[in-house]
Amino acid sequence: MKTIGIVLKPDHPQGKSVLEKLSHWLQQQGKEALVIDVAKKKPTLPPSLDMLIVLGGDGTLLSAARLVERLDIPILGVNLGSLGFLTEVTLDELYPTLERIFQNQYILDPRLMLKSVVRRGEKEHPQPRVLNDIVVSHGTLAKLIKLEIIINHQFVTWLRADGLIISTATGSTAYSLASGGPIVHPSVNAMILTPISPHTLTNRPIIVPAEVEVDVVLKTAEKGALVMLDGQEVFPLEGEDIIHIEASERRLKLIQSPHRNYYQVLRQKLKWGEG
């Protein structure tokens, strides 16, 4: 690994000093450090990158994931605050972890990503890839929306709710979990469909294979509904829009933390066993 990209959470109080120290250390190791500004409207990564380091939290990593997905390079998440589900490495662990990586002593953790397109009549509106979830929401509408859910061209159900979350296993500990969805180990190749405050209590989350194609049809005519992508990108919806969702061709290559496993992160983040 020669060329290392760095993504820093914008406006982080420690950010500038951490970035300067990391850049200097990488240069001492004979590496080229390139700072990537994800705050730009359309940030891009140079094709010469061998690895990407994300300094921030899970939200910063989600932004970076949309850039890395097409380049097929490993990404290391470093949390500048408390541990994240995606940014598992702490600042104190950063340099020992990088030393192991540069000695090829690391394990890749491939993560499923989702791609989607909004079909409106004869037009298609491709949406950014996501690592966590795609959410069809009532948005500014002060009422439930009606959705038709179809999987592999087979009708599943009508849903009246505040919305629907379609998440990866990685995203199962995000919005889906807050809406009553299950925790799914990130190695599981699946999508989770979780209703948001459904009108009928028997509408429950369902886990389906990642190989399926999911179509969500908005049956509410009033404007205001929208689709959210990893909680960061928004596309307004109209009645009869079809949100078509399927697995992305490539997996995101997260570098596993050598200091803790997934269950340790779960215990710490969800405070299991305390009290």
Image: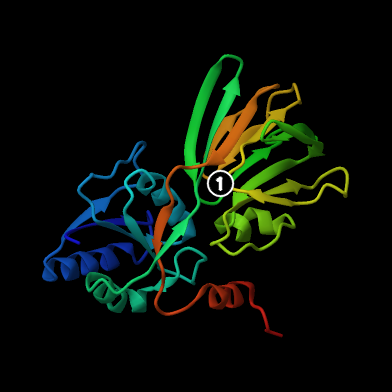
Snapshot quadrant of residue 213? top right
Total numbered labels: 1
* Residue at x-position 49% and y-position 71%: 83
Q: Can I make out residue 189 in this image?
A: yes
Q: Can I make out residue 142 in this image?
A: no
* Residue at x-position 41% and y-position 50%: 65
- Residue 119 location (% of width, % of height): 59, 23
The local secondary structure at tag 1 comes to: loop
209 to 102, vertically: above or below: above
Determine crowd level at label 1: few under 14, some 14-19, many 20+ residues with C-alpha closer than 10 A. Answer: some
Of the 4 image quadrants, the one containing the N terminus is bottom left
Kind of residue at disc 1:
Gly
Taking the image as shown, residue 43 lies to the left or right of residue 87, namely left
Q: List the residue tagged with mark 1.
A: 231
Snapshot quadrant of residue 51? bottom left
Taking the image as shown, residue 140 lies to the left or right of residue 49, namely right
- Residue 141 location (% of width, % of height): 73, 32
* Residue at x-position 32% and y-position 46%: 71
213 to 71, vertically: above or below: above
- Residue 132 location (% of width, % of height): 55, 51
* Residue at x-position 54% and y-position 17%: 123
Q: Nearer the viewer, residue 176 or 139?
A: 176
Q: Nearer the viewer, residue 257 or 220?
A: 257
Q: Nearer the viewer, residue 156 or 270?
A: 156
